[in-house]
Amino acid sequence: MTTESRTIDQPTTPAGAPTLQARNSAAFWTATGDSRGHEVIRRGGFLAVDGDNRAGLRILVQEPDLDPGELAELSYLTRRAAGPALVEDPFSSTDLSHLGMRTWQMPIMLRPPGPVHAPALDVTRVRRPEELQAAERIVIEGFELTGFEPHQAGELFPTALIEQPGVEVFIASVEGVPAGAGVSVVADGLASHYWIATSSAFRSRGVGRAVMLGALAHVADLPATLTASKLGRPLYESLGYTVASPSTWWASA
């Protein structure tokens, strides 16, 4: 990890959390799009990763106010997406109701730098293709990503993903069996976490906590953000995260 990649240039406060999350999400999805060979579209107000009929379109709003041209382009991209479209707006300021999409909110959570406990389970950083495929299967199952079924190895997590700067994938194992997985991304001095999932066969056994602790151990000196589901929020609060602001998500029907 270079010194530059661990230098933050945004305030690590609740007010600054939407921008922090927006920038880190953009870094993660740029890495994802590049590793998949999908088109990455960069605009001042948003970033889009335009995938195929299975991966779909992912749009990340980067500023609280899109200009009319950007909003029109975002709408166009959404309407003509080859697969499902998902728009993440950490500022909760862009109205996409004209697109007939379903919408919901999840909290952006912020954790200051600080020590973390050792995980109770074995947590390893993914290095080999077979480990990445195991993580991929866990995430597809845990998040019910039916668009990626039947499973095609490397479609969600291409091998090139773990070669992208700042991106790390972790697996938690129970008695040698992969049970949970997640992705950690460091960009501009901020850490964030994505795709934290547990295999259904290992639910309620502390697997998600182990994944988070294993990932946080590598970035304990950095502020960290994430966007939490309703079920995940109690876990993250127990790890020192606090709610900063709501993030609004829009998805094609």
Image (spheres, rainbow, N blue to C red):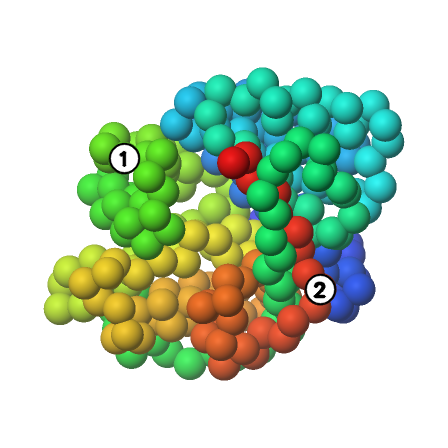
Among numbered discs 1 and 2, the one appearing first in the sequence: 1
Q: Position of residue 194 (x, y in %)?
A: 48, 53
Q: Residue at x 43, y 52 (%)?
A: 195
Q: Which mark is residue 149?
A: 1
Q: Pointer 1 and pointer 2: residues touching (CB < 8 Å)?
A: no
With respect to residue 121, does 158 lie above or below?
above
Q: What amino acid type is highlighted by mark number 1?
A: Glu
Q: What amino acid type is highlighted by mark number 2?
A: Ser
User: Horizontal placement of 209 versus 13: left or right?
Assistant: left
Q: Residues within 10 Å of mark 2 (few under 14, many from 20)?
A: many
Viewer-nearest residue: 111 or 164: 111
With respect to residue 242, does 123 lie above or below?
above
Q: Position of residue 61 (x, y in %)?
A: 70, 40
Residue marked by disc 2? 245
Q: Position of residue 197 (x, y in %)?
A: 36, 58
Q: Residues within 10 Å of mark 1 (few under 14, many from 20)?
A: few
Viewer-nearest residue: 151 or 190: 151
